[in-house]
Amino acid sequence: MSWGFETDPEYAAQLDWVSEFVTAEVEPLDQVIDHAWNTRDPQRNKLIRPLQQRVREQKLWACHLGPELGGPGYGQLKLALLNERIGHTHSGPVVFGNQAPDSGNAEILAHFGTDDLKKRYLEPLLENEIASSYSMTEPTGGSDPTDFRTRAVLEGDEWVLNGEKWFSSHANFAEFLIVMAVTDPDAPPHQRLSMFVVPTDTPGVEIVRPVGVFGHDEEEGTHPYLRYTDVRIPADHMLGGRGEGFQVAQTRLGGGRIHHAMRTVGLVRKSLDMMLERAVSRTSGGRPLGERQLVAEMIADSHIQLEQFRLLVLQTAWRIDRYQDYRKVIVDIASVKAAMPKVLLDVAGRAIQIHGSLGISEEMPFGKWALESYHMGLADGATELHKLQIAKRLMRGVQPTTGLFPSTHLPTMRAAAELKYGDLLLADDPVDA
């Protein structure tokens, strides 16, 4: 049996370096940078690339990748411990080379891309020389792939793409898009779709309008509404086989969901830390806020929620490392994904309350974090869908009762016990000599 909650000393020392580095370098960077993902911004590159080099020197670059792709191959558990230290920052994931959606798109290219696609897109993506976009959601069917309408039709040695996609994050500065489209409309629902690499400069790729998110301080929204009109794609730009788009998508979504949860642990912890500072610094009626019973309750509830959520995330990361198959940990991943928005909203909301009017002002980040909880409830699948998935899988293999009452019906159990032990219960008690 192997079980424990201690980090090996060598990695613990690296994590200490991460905490100090994030405080000294990454948190200040967040105050002066517009968008950490925009590799076309020279000011961004001047600020971020020296920090990325320092991370590489510590052998902490792209920890989600195996050695065959230039990463250290630390696995998901070590990645979770790293991400909870950088998750409260905007720039941290980019500085450490494990930012979404690029990390998931790299995983798809690594598994399903041709050698040419890997050379043109995967290699510069892993070095953060370019950015990418995942163009899946549609304005009509949301993120439900069985209702997608964007079509790709094979003409000779090219696919011709037509349709619209919604919320294609970072498409306005991405070098390429990974697009899911219907190629076989008459096939079963989960075999109708295929996945393609589409260079953003391909004729017919149009940004209908940039879309922003409340709480994201950007001059222009970075989640564009896209239209594809007669976009011609070489046949070898298909990722996976024809009709395998749904299966290809699962390669990135499992990892993406747990990575969001890892980073959210860091965001929740930062909210609690700021709440604690406020509780011991601010007075009310001559006493520190933290001595007020309802404030103390908010602090205690926040700590309990954080620790419960963190342990669920770490256990899920451990199981991914253990099984090396996202399909075996679907319930675990869905559980952390479903738990994540409420934990963040609850703790950020309490932090707002304890900070009073300052908490709701633009001078503190809590409003942005509270709104981010709703973003987390939608990214990579709505919370409700994950809860349905959990319940559906938990009920698999559970046998229904054949009788009128549940198998744990107390009168029925007592009758069965009396039948089993009846002779002993009726026997005379032995007489003491």
Image: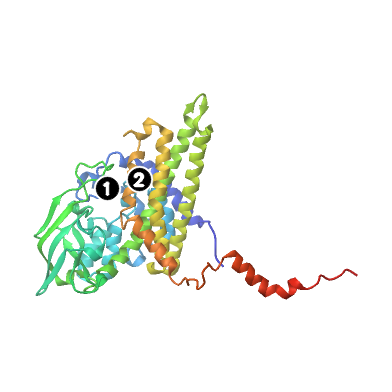
Q: Secondary structure at mark 2?
A: loop
Left or right, 80 with respect to 377, comes to right
Where is residue 115 drawn, in percent x and y? Answer: 22, 71
Left or right, 280 with respect to 22, comes to right
Q: Secondary structure at mark 1?
A: loop
Residue 88, numbered label:
none
* Kind of residue sitting beneath label 1: Ala
Residue under label 1, please give it: 36
Left or right, 338 with respect to 211, comes to right
- Residue appearing at x 42%, y 50% in the figure: 265
Total residue callouts: 2
Specify few, some or many for label 2: CA neighbours under 10 Å numbering under 14, 14-19, or 20 or more.
many
- Say which quarter of the image contains residue 25: top left
* Kind of residue sitting beneath label 2: Thr
Residue 89, numbered label:
2
- Say which quarter of the image contains residue 350: top left
- Residue appearing at x 32%, y 44% in the figure: 371
Quarter of the rendering occupied by the N terminus:
bottom right
Find the residue positioned furthest to the right: 433
> If you read the primary sequence from the N terminus, does the residue marked by circle 1 or circle 2 appear first?
1
Determine the CA span between mark 1 and mark 2. 11 Å
Q: What colouring style does the render use?
A: rainbow
Quarter of the rendering occupied by the C terminus:
bottom right
Above/below status of 20 relative to 277: below
Above/below status of 23 relative to 6: above
Where is residue 132 drawn, in percent x and y? Answer: 22, 57
Residue 233 visible in the shown view: yes
